[in-house]
C-alpha cells in the first residue's frame, strides 16, 4: 500500500489559478460551520430525548465543554502542520475526516449511543481546530496583501451567517423529520461532501518549508510562539484582542438566555433566538469593516469599536425590560464586534512570519478558546458568587470591555491617532500631502515647533507609524510620557543634540520620529558655530514640519521643509 505521504502528495486541485479561490474557500468554511452547528444542536436534542429533560442542563454543559477542549489541545499542533504542508491539501484532508465523522454519525444517531455522540462531537471539534490555522493562514496566499482586509471581512461575515443558518436548520430539520435524527445525520454527510469538493476547487498552495516538529507539550509551544510575536510590533496585543472578542461573544451567548428569563419574561427558546441578532450584526459589521479598511489594516477601528461595544452592553442593562431596545443593542454589539475583529485578524495574518503564520494563528486560537472558558467562569462568578442579575452582568462586561479598549488605544496609539485624524480632522480642515512628500519623510527626522495636539493629530493622519519625542521639560505633555506606545520622553529642549540622537535610534528601527518642541530652535539658543548647527545645516535627514493654510478653502496642508 502507498504511504500516507504519497497519498497526500497526490491530492489534486481543480483550480490552477487564483481566480475564485477565495470564493471556494468561503464555501468550504461556510458549509463546515453549518455542519458543526447542525450536528452539535441536533445531537443535544437527541440526547435530551434519550436521557430526559431533567438532564438538559448537564447535556448542554457537556456539549459546550467537549466542543472547546480540542481547540485547546490541538490548535498549536494544527498551526505547525499548516506551516509544514500545503494549506490547500490540509483543507482537503480535513474535509475527508469530516465525511468520515458524518458516516459514523448515521450509525451513532440510529443507535442513540450517548458515548458515541460525545465521541463524534470531540472528533468533529478536532477537525474544526485543525481546520482553523489553514483556513485563515491561506488567505494571504490567495489574495494580494491590499485585499486581505476585505477577504477577512467576507470570511468573518459568512462565518456568522453560517452560525445563524446552522442554528436555524438544527431546529427546522428536527421538526420536519419528526425527530428522525438519522436522516439529519445523512443531511450532514451531504453537506460534508459538498465541502470536500469545494476544498478541491481552492487554488493549490505551496508548503512554507517550516521543519518544526509537533511537541506533545503544547503549552510550551504556545508560550514560545507568543514570545516570538513580541518581536513584531503590535502583533501580541492584536492576538489578545482577537481572544477578547471571542470571550465577550461567548459571554453574550451564555448570558442571553438567563437574561431573557429574568428581564424580558421570555422562554429559554426565545432567549436563544435573541443571540441571532448579535450574530447577524457581526456578519454585517464584518462586511462593512472589510469595505472600510480597503487597503489599510485599521487597528484604530478596533479601538473605536471596543468603546462602542462597551456602551451598548451598558444600554442592554439600562433598558433590560424593553425587548426592542435590547434587540437593537444586541444588533449593534454584533455590528461593532465585526468591526472590532476583522482588523485584528487581518493584522495577525499579514504580520506573522510566513513560516510561522500557522503557529501564530494556532496560538491565537488557543487563547481565543481559553477566552470561551473564561466567559463560562465569569458568568458563574457574576451570577452565583456575586449574586448579580444577568442585566447587571452585561453592565460589568461593558466596563471590562471599556478598560480593555483603553489598553488597545495605549498599545495601538500610533494607528489609533492616525484613524482618529483621518475620520474627524481630514474632512474638516486638512488636505493630505502628495505621496512623494510622504515617501521622503520615511527616511527623515521631523521637527515640529510650537507643537500642539491638533498638529500632532494631523501629522499622525499623514504618517500612521509616526512616533513623537516630547522633551522632558514640556509641561503640557508631561502626563503622557510612557503611557502611549508612540509617545516617548526625550531630553530637555536645551539638549537638542541628544534629542536628535534619540530620534536617529528610532529611525534605525524604521520608525518615523517627530520631535515636538514647545518653542523654536532659535529660542533654544542653537549657535551657528555649534557642531549641531553645522550638522543640521548639511543634513538631508532633518525636516521642519510646516502647516500651510489655503486662504480659498480654509483647509490646511502639511509640508516638510529643510
Image: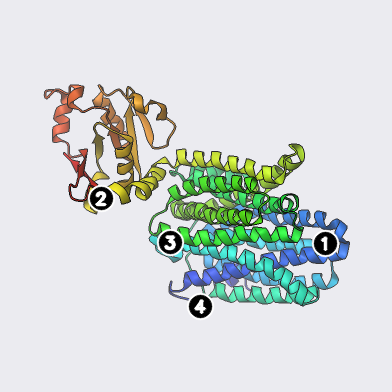
Q: Residue at x 46, y 38 (%)?
A: 410
| Mark nearer the N terminus (1 vs 3) | 1
**Element under label 1?**
helix
Residue 332 seen anywhere in this rendered image of the structure: yes
Q: Quadrant of the N terminus?
A: bottom right
Q: From the image, state whether disc 2 or disc 3 is nearer to you.
A: 2
The residue identified by callout 2 is 431
Q: Disc 1, disc 3: CB below 8 Å?
A: no
Q: Name the one closer to the observer, 68 or 482.
A: 482
| Mark nearer the N terminus (2 vs 3) | 3
Q: Disc 2, disc 4: CB below 8 Å?
A: no
Residue at mark 1 to residue at mark 3: CA–CA distance? 45 Å
Q: Disc 4, disc 1: CB below 8 Å?
A: no
Residue at mark 2 to residue at mark 4: CA–CA distance? 49 Å
| Mark nearer the N terminus (1 vs 2) | 1
**Mark 2 residue crowding within 10 angstroms, few (<14) / some (14–19) / many (20+):** many
The residue identified by callout 3 is 291
Residue 405 locus on image (x, y percent): 51, 42
Q: Name the one closer to the observer, 456 or 531.
A: 456
**Element under label 2?**
strand
Tell me the number on the disc at residue 14: 4
The residue identified by callout 1 is 115
**Element under label 4?**
loop
Q: From the image, state whether disc 4 or disc 1 is nearer to you.
A: 1
Residue at mark 2 to residue at mark 3: CA–CA distance? 23 Å
Q: Residue at x 61, y 54 (%)?
A: 325
Residue at mark 4 to residue at mark 1: CA–CA distance? 38 Å
Q: Which residue is drawn at 56% across and 58% down?
A: 133
**Element under label 3?**
helix
Residue 542 seen anywhere in this rendered image of the structure: no
Residue at mark 4 to residue at mark 3: CA–CA distance? 29 Å
Amino acid at each position: 500500500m502507498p504511504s500516507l505521504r504519497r497519498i497526500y502528495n497526490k491530492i489534486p486541485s481543480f483550480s490552477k489559478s487564483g481566480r475564485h479561490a477565495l470564493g471556494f474557500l468561503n464555501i468550504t468554511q461556510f458549509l463546515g460551520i453549518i455542519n458543526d452547528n447542525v450536528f452539535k444542536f441536533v445531537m443535544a436534542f437527541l440526547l435530551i430525548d434519550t436521557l430526559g429533560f431533567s438532564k438538559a442542563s448537564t447535556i448542554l454543559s457537556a456539549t459546550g465543554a467537549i466542543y472547546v477542549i480540542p481547540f485547546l489541545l490541538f490548535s498549536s499542533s494544527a498551526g505547525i502542520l499548516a506551516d509544514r504542508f500545503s494549506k490547500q491539501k490540509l483543507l482537503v484532508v480535513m474535509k475527508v475526516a469530516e465525511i468520515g465523522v458524518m458516516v459514523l454519525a448515521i450509525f451513532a444517531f440510529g443507535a442513540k449511543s450517548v458515548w458515541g455522540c460525545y465521541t463524534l462531537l470531540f472528533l468533529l471539534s478536532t477537525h474544526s481546530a485543525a481546520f482553523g490555522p489553514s483556513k485563515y493562514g491561506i488567505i494571504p496566499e490567495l489574495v494580494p496583501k491590499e485585499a486581505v482586509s476585505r477577504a477577512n471581512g467576507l470570511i468573518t461575515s459568512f462565518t456568522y451567517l453560517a452560525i445563524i443558518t446552522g442554528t436555524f436548520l438544527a431546529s427546522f430539520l428536527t421538526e420536519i423529520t419528526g425527530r428522525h435524527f438519522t436522516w439529519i445525520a445523512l443531511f450532514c454527510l451531504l453537506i460534508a461532501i459538498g465541502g470536500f469538493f469545494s476544498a478541491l476547487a481552492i487554488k493549490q498552495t505551496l508548503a512554507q518549508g517550516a521543519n518544526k516538529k509537533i511537541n506533545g507539550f503544547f503549552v510550551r509551544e504556545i508560550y514560545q510562539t507568543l514570545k516570538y510575536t513580541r518581536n513584531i510590533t503590535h502583533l501580541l496585543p492584536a492576538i489578545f484582542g482577537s481572544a477578547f472578542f471571542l470571550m465577550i461573544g461567548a459571554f453574550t451567548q451564555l448570558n442571553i438566555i438567563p437574561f431573557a428569563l429574568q428581564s424580558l419574561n421570555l422562554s429559554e427558546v426565545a432567549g436563544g433566538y435573541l443571540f441571532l441578532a448579535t450574530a447577524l450584526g457581526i456578519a454585517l459589521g464584518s462586511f462593512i469593516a472589510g469595505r472600510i479598511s480597503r487597503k489599510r489594516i485599521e487597528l484604530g477601528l478596533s479601538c473605536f469599536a471596543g468603546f462602542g461595544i462597551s456602551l451598548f452592553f451598558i444600554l442592554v442593562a439600562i433598558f433590560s425590560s424593553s425587548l426592542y431596545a435590547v434587540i437593537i443593542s444586541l444588533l449593534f454589539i454584533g455590528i461593532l464586534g465585526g468591526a472590532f475583529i476583522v482588523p485584528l485578524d487581518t493584522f495577525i495574518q499579514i504580520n506573522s512570519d510566513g513560516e510561522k503564520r500557522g503557529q501564530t494563528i494556532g496560538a491565537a486560537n488557543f487563547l481565543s478558546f481559553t477566552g470561551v472558558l473564561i466567559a463560562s467562569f465569569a458568568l458563574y462568578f457574576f451570577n452565583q458568587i456575586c449574586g448579580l442579575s444577568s442585566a447587571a452582568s452585561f453592565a460589568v462586561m461593558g466596563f471590562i470591555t471599556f478598560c480593555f479598549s483603553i489598553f488597545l488605544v495605549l498599545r495601538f496609539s500610533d494607528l489609533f491617532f492616525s484613524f482618529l485624524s483621518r475620520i474627524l480632522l481630514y474632512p474638516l480642515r486638512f488636505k493630505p500631502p502628495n505621496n512623494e512628500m510622504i515617501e521622503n519623510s520615511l527616511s527623515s527626522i521631523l521637527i515640529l515647533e510650537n507643537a500642539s495636539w491638533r498638529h500632532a493629530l494631523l501629522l499622525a493622519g499623514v504618517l500612521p507609524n509616526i512616533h513623537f519625542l516630547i522633551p522632558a521639560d514640556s509641561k503640557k505633555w508631561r502626563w503622557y510620557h510612557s503611557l502611549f506606545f508612540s509617545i516617548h520622553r526625550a531630553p530637555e529642549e536645551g539638549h537638542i543634540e541628544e534629542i536628535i540622537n534619540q530620534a536617529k535610534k528610532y529611525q534605525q528601527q524604521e520608525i518615523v520620529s517627530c520631535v515636538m518642541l514647545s518653542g523654536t530652535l532659535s529660542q533654544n539658543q542653537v549657535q551657528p558655530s555649534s557642531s549641531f548647527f553645522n550638522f543640521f545645516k548639511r543634513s538631508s535627514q532633518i525636516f521642519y514640519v510646516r502647516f500651510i493654510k489655503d486662504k480659498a478653502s480654509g483647509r490646511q496642508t502639511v509640508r516638510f521643509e529643510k
